[in-house]
Image: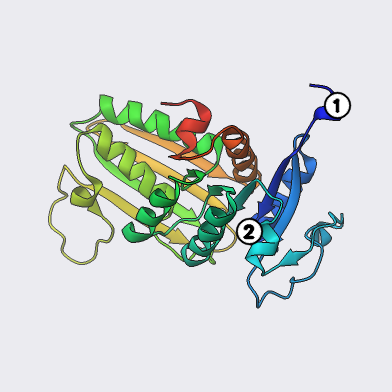
Amino acid sequence: MSAADFQPLRVCVAGASGRMGQMLVDAIRASGDCQLSGALDIPASPAIGQDAGAFGGEPTGVAITADLAAGLAGSRFLIDFTRPEGTLAHLRECVKQGVNLVIGTTGFSDAQKAEIAEASKSIAIVMAPNMSVGVNVTLKLLDMAARAMSTGYDIEIIEAHHRHKIDAPSGTALKMGEVVAQAMGRDLKDCAVYAREGVTGERDPSSIGFATIRGGDIVGDHTVLFAGTGERIEISHKSSNRAGYAQGSLRAVRFLADKTSGLYDMFDVLGLR
């Protein structure tokens, strides 16, 4: 393909004025194959009408808007790290316009997940609780570890995030629990323990425990502890900033470039199946 034939991947960003939104705008601008084509935010945002790159000091020529139809017009992809209700509103407009979707939002109910699955019959969607390449490699390592240590080890998942995070445990921690449980032939719904207080009795050896920490500006720390007799193994991933999530999201966009429908996750994107 000649330079004259090159067509950039036209990407819209939801929640464009937020921390993650700005990281995505910067990553798109720095990429060699993607172009910012739209920027969305809620109607009450003070950023409405401003250039999406104004916060970083480099104008993009794309104004932030609350008008979903106008904001998505001309885009082939939307990257969404907002909240479940907002993501579902964006999803419906994406279906109308035939825009493929990358979803990094967490905290969906089963009914909301079902709506996303139904929409994937019309558009292509990558949905993952964590877009980081490192986190998804960690999930693969957890699958391997859980298969080897399916008996004789107690499993605890500890996660820490910033004070502004509204759901707990994190979507990534829950995904880690699902991966471990599945590798051991269990259902996380039946063996998860999310809180301990008072006289709890001895630990059920088949349980998977969760501990949640919220404070400061912690981007995201996750550790899965396999505690056995005479030894323990810890598999951890720690994020120092959101750049990894943004780069993983762009890899998901590139993966969707030749897709017209289907529901995928980051294991599909990274070839980790």
Q: Residue furthest top?
A: 1
Q: Secondary structure at mark 2?
A: loop
- Label 1's element? helix
- Identify the amino acid type marked 1: Ala
Q: Taking the image as drawn, is residue 26 in sight?
A: yes
Residue 71 placement (x, y as % from top left): 69, 61
Residue drawn where x is 40% and y is 61% of the image: 168
Across and down, in percent, residue 174 comes to 36, 49
Q: Is residue 91 left or right of residue 199?
A: right
Q: Is residue 202 above or below residue 7?
A: below
The residue type indicated by label 2 comes to Ala
Of 64 and 173, nearer the camera is 64
Nearer-N-terminus badge (2/1)? 1
Q: What residue is rendered at 24% in x and 51% in y?
A: 192
Image position of 28 (left or right of 199) = right
Q: Position of residue 109 (x, y in %)?
A: 35, 60
Front in this rendered view, residue 35 or 245: 35
Task: Looking at the picture, tell me which residue is in the foreground, 89 or 213.
Answer: 89
Total numbered labels: 2
Nearer the observer: mark 2 or 1; the answer is: 1
Q: At 37% across and 32% down in the image, what residue appears?
A: 142
The quarter holding residue 38 reads bottom right
The residue sitting at 66% across, 44% down in the picture is 243
Q: Which residue is mark 1?
A: 3
Furthest-bottom residue in this view? 44
Per the model, the C-alpha gap separating discs 2 and 1 is 29 Å
Residue 158 visible? The answer is: no
Residue that numbered label 2 is attached to? 14
Q: Quadrant of the N terminus?
A: top right
Q: Residues within 10 Å of mark 2 (few under 14, many from 20)?
A: many
Q: In front here: 22 or 6?
A: 6
